[in-house]
Image (cartoon, helix red, strand yellow):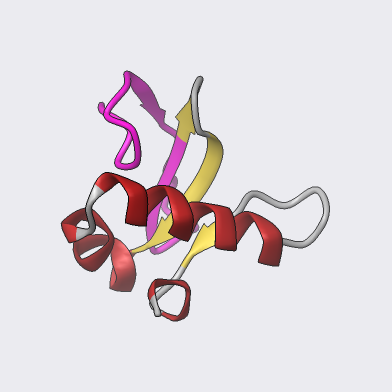
C-alpha cells in the first residue's frame, strides 16, 4: 500500500480490533487513521496531511501511535 500522508511504500498494519487504517511507513512512522476520518484526511493536500499527523503525534499518549481522528482534522 501507499502511505496516505507521503505516498511512499507503507505497510498496512490494520487488524480487526481497530475501526480504521493502521500504517507503518518508513518516512512517516507508525500511525492510525480512524475510519470516520479517513476520507476527509485523504482529501487534504500534502502539507495539511503532514500538519494533521503532527498534531496527532503531539496529542498521542507516550508509547502509543498517533491517531488521526475527525477532531484532529479541525
Q: Quadrant of residue 30?
A: top right
Q: Which residues are magenta?
A: 1-23
Q: Quadrant of residue 9?
A: top left
Farthest residue, direction right? 62
Q: Quadrant of residue 22?
A: top left
Residue pictured at 68% horizontal, 67% vertical: 59
Residue pictured at 16% horizontal, 59% vertical: 43
In the foreground, 17 or 28: 28
Apparent side of residue 17 relative to residue 35 in the rendered image (left or right): right
Residue pictured at 32% horizontal, 22% vertical: 8
Place of residue 34 in the rendered image (x, y in percent of width and height, measured from the top left): 40, 64
Is 14 one of the magenta-colored residues? yes
Place of residue 32 in the rendered image (x, y in percent of width and height, measured from the top left): 48, 52
User: Which secondary structure dominates the residues rendered in magenta?
Assistant: loop
Is 5 one of the magenta-colored residues? yes
Place of residue 40 in the rendered image (x, y in percent of width and height, measured from the top left): 22, 67
In the foreground, 12 or 54: 54
Amino acid at each position: 500500500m501507499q502511505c496516505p500522508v507521503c505516498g511512499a511504500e507503507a505497510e498496512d498494519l490494520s487488524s480487526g480490533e481497530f475501526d480504521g487504517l493502521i500504517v507503518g511507513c518508513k518516512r512517516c512512522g507508525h500511525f492510525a487513521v480512524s475510519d470516520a476520518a479517513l476520507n476527509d484526511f485523504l482529501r487534504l493536500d500534502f502539507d495539511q496531511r503532514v500538519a494533521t499527523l503532527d498534531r496527532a503525534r503531539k496529542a498521542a499518549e507516550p508509547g502509543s501511535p498517533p491517531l488521526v481522528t475527525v477532531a484532529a482534522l479541525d
